[in-house]
Amino acid sequence: EAGVAQSPRYKIIEKRQSVAFWCNPISGHATLYWYQQILGQGPKLLIQFQNNGVVDDSQLPKDRFSAERLKGVDSTLKIQPAKLEDSAVYLCASSPDRDLYNEQFFGPGTRLTVL
Amino acid sequence: DAKTTQPPSMDCAEGRAANLPCNHSTISGNEYVYWYRQIHSQGPQYIIHGLKNNETNEMASLIITEDRKSSTLILPHATLRDTAVYYCIVRVSSFGGSYDKVIFGPGTSLSVIP
């Protein structure tokens, strides 16, 4: 079974530029998560989708971050404009059902560096 | 804030058992204990979860105290590939039930030493 795919793996931008990350979850997984992981910290949930609806986006900085999940499959996370403090690894995860067993499958992440 | 506390780092000799503790003194009756690990430059990986009984799978064993206020993840024969950050998380698991946020703490950085 193919895992969660993310692209790009690495991205370097200057502050105030825009950037977008893409995630393709495991086929058939209804729930998709985006996390932000700053160096030395655990992942922090930014947004959770159930199919193509948002379940939780309470920690998403909505003035600059946006996310969508088209047709309940792929998802994109965008930052516009980026700030220095956005430098982090952005992880995408999926799970087969909202709560059942709560096993989340993570992708490799996108490492963003904002200069 | 995370509902768990873990030591920031631990060492373990290769081939020996690694015992990683976790305190979750405010755990509720319907909250499960989950363990994930994150090897350097990879996404977190699910290890095991439990409610109140001890659990074992091919990766590890989970021992939960009778009062459920703490637990221990046991890697029976640690190898160098087990060097990683280990996260202990508590959350509700209820099919179709209420939603609860997954909160990762800083975890325990385990170093397996040759």
Image (cartoon, rainbow, N blue to C red):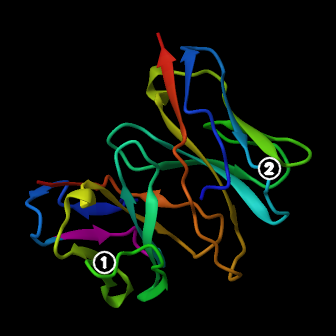
What residue would you read off at disc 1?
A74
Query: Disc 2 vs disc 1: which is toward the camera?
Result: 2
Mark 2 — on which chain does it sit? Answer: B
Q: Nearer the viewer, residue B93 or A29?
A: B93
Residue segment shown in magenta = A20-28
Query: Are discs 2 and 1 less than 8 Å apart at CB?
Result: no
In the picture, measured across the screen, residue B41 lies left or right of residue B17, that is: left
Mark 1 — on which chain does it sit? Answer: A
| Residue A90 drawn at (x, y percent) | 31, 59
Residue flagged by tag 2: what amino acid is it? Ser
Residue for point 43% across, 47% down: A41
Residue for point 17% across, 60% down: A8
Q: Nearer the viewer, residue A59 or A104?
A: A59
Residue A75 in the image: above or below residue A21: below
| Residue A34 drawn at (x, y percent) | 39, 68
Within the magenta stretch, is there residue A26? Answer: yes
| Residue A72 drawn at (x, y percent) | 38, 85
Residue for point 24% across, 55% down: A87
Residue for point 30% across, 87% down: A70
Q: Nearer the viewer, residue A4 or A82?
A: A82
| Residue A56 drawn at (x, y percent) | 50, 80
Residue that lies at the very extreme toward the top in this rendered image:
B114
In the picture, measured across the screen, residue A64 lies left or right of residue B31, that is: left
Residue flagged by tag 1: what amino acid is it? Asp
In the picture, measured across the screen, residue A38 lies left or right of residue B20, that is: left
Q: In which quarter of the view is residue B51 placed?
A: bottom right
In the picture, measured across the screen, residue B71 lies left or right of residue A89, that is: right
Within the magenta stretch, is there residue B98? Answer: no
Residue A37 in the image: above or below residue A19: above
What residue would you read off at disc 2?
B25
Q: Nearer the viewer, residue B55 or A8?
A: A8
